[in-house]
Every structure is written in structure tokens, then in C-alpha cells.
Image (spheres, helix red, strand yellow):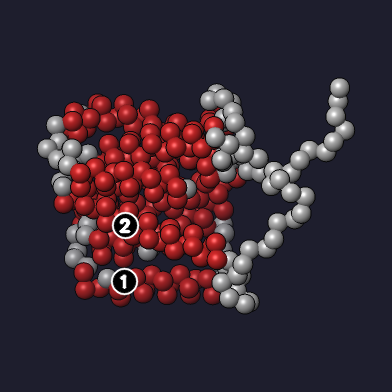
Amino acid sequence: MASNSPILPLTGTDTPPKSEEKIFKGSPMTKRGAYAAISYMACAVLLVLFNKAALSSYNFPCANVITLCQMICSCCFLYALRRWKLISFHAGEAAMADTFKSMVPLRTLINTSPVAVTYLLYMLATMESVRGVNVPMYTTLRRTTVVFTMIVEYILARQKYTPPILGSVALIVLGAFIAGARDLSFDYYGYLVVFLSNITTAIYLATIARVGKSSGLNSFGLMWCNGILCGPVLLIWTFIRGDLEMTMNFSSLLSPGFLVNPMFIQLHLSESH
């Protein structure tokens, strides 16, 4: 017999949610947003340092393997969270359990393949750029990513920015170069790889803006698609190049200090998306 009772709200109460507490009176930022920003900033800094330690201090030769491990772990985390009804993959969708095949339809996977390709290029270029330069130089040059992003958006969508925004970006870039001026050491390969990483990052962000929104997926869904599409490709590539065999023969593979680095990288990237 059909029930006439209304569907219960997800929050378990009929009262509207209370507005979040602000940092201080008149501020648009909430305490929750501030905590999230500070946490992300701390993780981003540690991510670069741990990447550098794994690739330079330990001289680990296979950056692609770290990227592959990150994709595998991210997909496992996302699948578990989806099955436990803690997250959803579609924008505006309530968290609910689902089967593996129907989490993201095949048509959606195909439509998001451009995002996955640019994501793979972005990840590989970023990992190599960390290896090729020192941390201050990497941090300084990566501040120019926003400039490349604005150029790509203008080329693809003819998007223009107001003088205040352009001035703010110029101030950020100038401040970054001033901060890292004493540590800049010219290196053709290092500069080339970092700027290539900036270009791939800009293309990735522009692709998300054009394809990601039309797919109906949120950030978790896009990350799931990236892992599902890029993981097998990267696995085959690392096998052909012999990176997997080199990893198994790596002298510091079981070193506790080395193992902490990729574990943190995987956890951070799965949470930050």
C-alpha cells in the first residue's frame, strides 16, 4: 500500500540549516572555509617538499610510478566513500550507494576523456618539474600558472579580464619572483619543464571549465573518471618503459622515510580534489 507521508529530508530535520559562523563581522569567509583553506595550503606545501624528497633526496627514478600509485589509491578511496554514501559523483545528487558499473555511465566517461588526457599530461609534467628544479625555484615559477591560464582562456573562449584582476595577477607574480630571487639559478631544462607544467595545468583547468561542467559531474566524479581512464594507460606505459621493474629493485623501496612520501601524496591528492 502506497504511503502518503512526505520524503524525509537528508539532514533529518525540517528546519533550515543555520548559516555558518563568520571569521569576523562583515567577512564573507566562514570559519569552515578558513580551516579548509589553511589545511589545503599546508598540504600543498608539504606535497612539494615530499615530492622533492622522494625524487631527489632518495633519487627515486620513476616519477610515473608515484603518479600511478596516486591514481590507484584515489580510485579506491573514492569508490569506498561512494559505497559508504559519504559522497556523490554528480552535481546536486544526494550521496547514495551504487554499483560499480553505474557510478558513472560509459557515455559520460567518453565525454570526459579530454579532461582525463589533459589531467595525465598535467600530472606527469608536474612530477618531472619537481625533480628538475629546487623548491624555491619551483614555487616561484609555478606562480606564473595563472598567467598561462588566462592566456589559454582568452584563446579558447576569448575571455577578457578587468584591469584590477590583471593588476592583482601581476602583483602576485612579481611578489613570487621577488621572494625567490636569491634562489633562482638558470637551468634550461628546469625552466622548460616547469613552464611546460604551467601550460599543461592551464589547459587542464580550461578543459574542466568547458567539458567538466557539461558532464554533470562534481569534482569527485571528475577525479574518478580521470583515474579510471588514465590508470590503465599509465600502467601499460610504466610496464613498457620498465619503471615497474626498476621500482621493485629500488634499494630504498622499503625504507620507512621513503614510504611515507608517496602515502602522503596519495592521501593529499585524493582529499584535495
Q: Which amino acid does label 1 sit on?
A: Phe
Say whether residue 69 is left or right of residue 241.
right
Choose between 4 and 183: the one closer to the eye.
4
Q: Residue at x 55, y 66 (%)?
A: 31
Residue 232 picture location, percent across and down:
38, 27
Q: Which amino acid does label 2 sit on?
A: Leu
The location of residue 254, given as percent across then percent down, is 18, 37
Q: Name the residue under label 1.
A: 177
Residue at (57%, 44%) from the top-left corner? Answer: 218
* Vertical relation: 133 (above or below) 116: below
**Residue plotted at (15% across, 46% down):** 59
| Residue 104 in which image quadrant | top right
Specify the label residue 125 is tagged with: none
Q: Quadrant of the N terminus?
A: top right
Residue 191 drawn at (x, y percent): 26, 58
Earlier-in-chain disc, 1 versus 2: 2
Residue of label 2: 46
| Residue 41 seen by the camera | yes
